[in-house]
Amino acid sequence: MSQERIKNGPMKKKVGILVFPGSNCDHDAYYAMKTVLQADAEFVWHKERELKEYDLIVVPGGFSYGDYLRSGAIARFSPVMEAVAAYAKQGRPVIGICNGFQILLEAGLLPGAMLHNEHLRFICKDVHIRVETSRSQFTAGLEPGDVLKIPVSHGEGNYFTDADGLASLEDQDQILFRYCDANGALTPESNVNGSVASIAGICNTERNVLGMMPHPERAMEQRLGSDHGLRFFEQMMEQLQPA
Amino acid sequence: MYHAEIHITLRKSILDPQGKAASHALTNLGLTGIESVRIGKLIELSIDATNEQEAETIAREACEKLLANEVMEDFTIKLTNA
């Protein structure tokens, strides 16, 4: 354990939040981690080639590189992403939110791709998502069927994978969240962007990389509409093993 | 010098909402006979290569590594000696 970690106390989780040119939810993630969750959070500029001993890496939302070519397509070649891939390969946890999810898809750390929303509109509103499995370090403190109210904010969140890809996600229990209505039912209306099988969040087969379109970091306080993001992060932080 | 014209389109099996919206608009304009619209991207590369095969290899690598996402897109390369 490093001197720094001892100074901060063993319980203080160390979180690295990546920053790309065009990231715009990096400060929301920092506020959620540092101010609300009292974690030892810091920003990691995309030019960094090495990562410190973080307990968690957050790839935040935004419009990295202006979404040129495809969302996340350029950011995945930023120097820091090689370090993130190596970090993930060691089994350390990575969470990509919105554009962060898109970057992880482009980087091949998660399967599938993102299409434009089915109705072509940018959506920015609260949605409900249903927890599909507790079998991941990201959802171990939640129950399948739990419904969280968390905002989405995206134009390209229409998750796509072909029939074989979907079967594989389902067989390996990699779907962590689906869009649902307030009661937890999967309806065509609640699938806000047209995603395959209403998918809102998935993990990799090793279960240490999570990508989700909804923004839990924007749902940290009841006075801002919902504190279900806090509920999600709190139980997730409990599961984190020290680096 | 070679000129590569790269067409990137959504895989045939994937619904193209942009194309569908444009198709509806064309119908509303009174244009008939257009059965479907698919919208893609055109990317042009100028490639310094010694022969066509080398240029083709470079263009293909560019598509596979960055320009196209083969999970959802197909690409075609048309090469001309510029």
Image: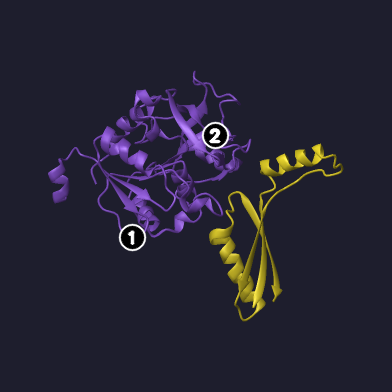
Chain colours: A purple, B yellow
In whole angstroms, how far apart are the C-alphas of marks 1 and 2? 34 Å
Number of other residues with Cα within 10 Å of mark 1, as a class: few under 14, some 14 to 19, many 20 or more? some
Q: Is residue A67 above or below residue A224?
A: below
- Residue at point 52%, 40% (across, down): A168
Chain for numbered disc 2: A
Under tag 1, what secondary structure? loop
Is residue B16 in sight in this rendering?
A: no
Residue A55 relative to residue A71: left or right: left
Nearer the observer, disc 1 or disc 2?
A: 2
Which of marks 2 and 1 precedes in the sequence? 1
- The quarter of the picture where residue A86 lies is bottom left
- The amino acid at mark 1 is Arg
Q: Where does the image place residue A9, in percent across and percent down from the top left?
A: 15, 40
Name the residue that disc number 2 marks.
A123
Number of other residues with Cα within 10 Å of mark 2, as a class: few under 14, some 14 to 19, many 20 or more? some
- Residue at point 60%, 77% (across, down): B48
Q: Where does the image place residue A113, in percent across and percent down from the top left?
A: 54, 46
- The amino acid at mark 2 is Ile
Q: Residue furthest right?
A: B33
Name the residue that disc number 1 marks.
A49
Q: Where does the image place residue A1, in percent across and percent down from the top left?
A: 16, 49
